Image (spheres, rainbow, N blue to C red):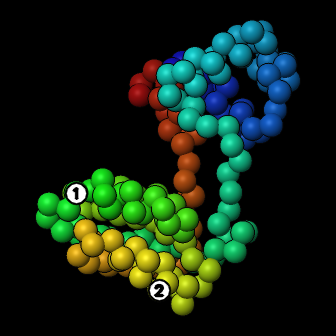
């Protein structure tokens, strides 16, 4: 990635509905250059999607929690991941090192509903135990634009 890629990413991240022609005008580069950069960034996997970002809170899921799952030896992470993928309230899951084997970020409609979500997660026989941490406030939301900007700096 170079500085132009960084500027294209920053512009479209802040205004995803912006057209390529308007982006070229604002950036002072040819429309074809903007389109070629977008195509290259998408083909290389830097840009992973164009869909709208949703707020779980705004659609009725104000509680966020992180589950640390301990997986039964020999049960396999893939089976657990497949089970978690079938639960809409599971937003993401990662295999981890350290205490526990997998982290899952989940949302719920209330603390009582969180218990329902945890119970649903624990129906997978490959999960031995779960520890839950409830998020109180978002201090830094998920972001990657500053990372993209850092990646385009010559000293990075």
Q: Is residue 135 above or below residue 38?
A: below
Looking at the image, tell me whether mark 2 or mark 1 is earlier in sequence order: 1
Q: Is residue 100 above or below residue 154?
A: below
Image side of residue 6 versus residue 13, left or right: left
Which is nearer the eye, 62 or 5?
Answer: 62
Image side of residue 61 versus residue 23, left or right: left
Q: Label 2: which residue?
A: 115
Q: Which mark is residue 68?
A: none
Q: Residues within 10 Å of mark 1 (few under 14, many from 20)?
A: few
Looking at the image, the residue that sits furthest to the bottom is 112
Residue 139 visible to the viewer: no
Res 61 quadrant in image: bottom right
Count of marks overlaid on the render: 2
Which residue appears at 54% of the width and 90% of the height?
A: 112
Split into 4 quadrants, where in the image is the C terminus? top left
Q: Label 1: which residue?
A: 76
Judged from the image, the secondary structure of the residue bearing numbered disc 2 is helix
Image side of residue 55 versus residue 19, left or right: left
Which is nearer the eye, 126 or 115?
Answer: 126
Q: Residues within 10 Å of mark 2 (few under 14, many from 20)?
A: few
Residue 41 image point, x, y percent: 57, 23
Residue 71 image point, x, y percent: 23, 67
């Amino acid at each position: 990635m170079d500085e132009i890629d960084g500027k294209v990413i920053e512009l479209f991240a802040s205004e995803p509905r912006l057209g390529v022609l308007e982006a070229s005008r604002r950036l002072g580069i040819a429309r074809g250059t903007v389109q070629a950069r977008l195509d290259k960034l998408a083909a290389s996997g830097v840009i992973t999607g164009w869909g709208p970002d949703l707020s779980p809170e705004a659609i009725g899921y104000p509680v966020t929690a992180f589950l640390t799952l301990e997986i039964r030896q020999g049960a396999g992470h893939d089976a657990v991941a497949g089970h978690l993928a079938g639960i809409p309230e599971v937003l993401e899951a990662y295999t981890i090192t350290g205490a526990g084997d997998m982290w899952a970020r989940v949302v719920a409609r209330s603390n009582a509903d969180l218990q329902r979500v945890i119970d649903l997660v624990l129906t997978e026989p490959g999960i031995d135990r779960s520890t839950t941490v409830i998020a109180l406030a978002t201090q830094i939301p998920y972001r990657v634009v500053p990372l993209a900007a850092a990646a385009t700096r010559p000293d990075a």
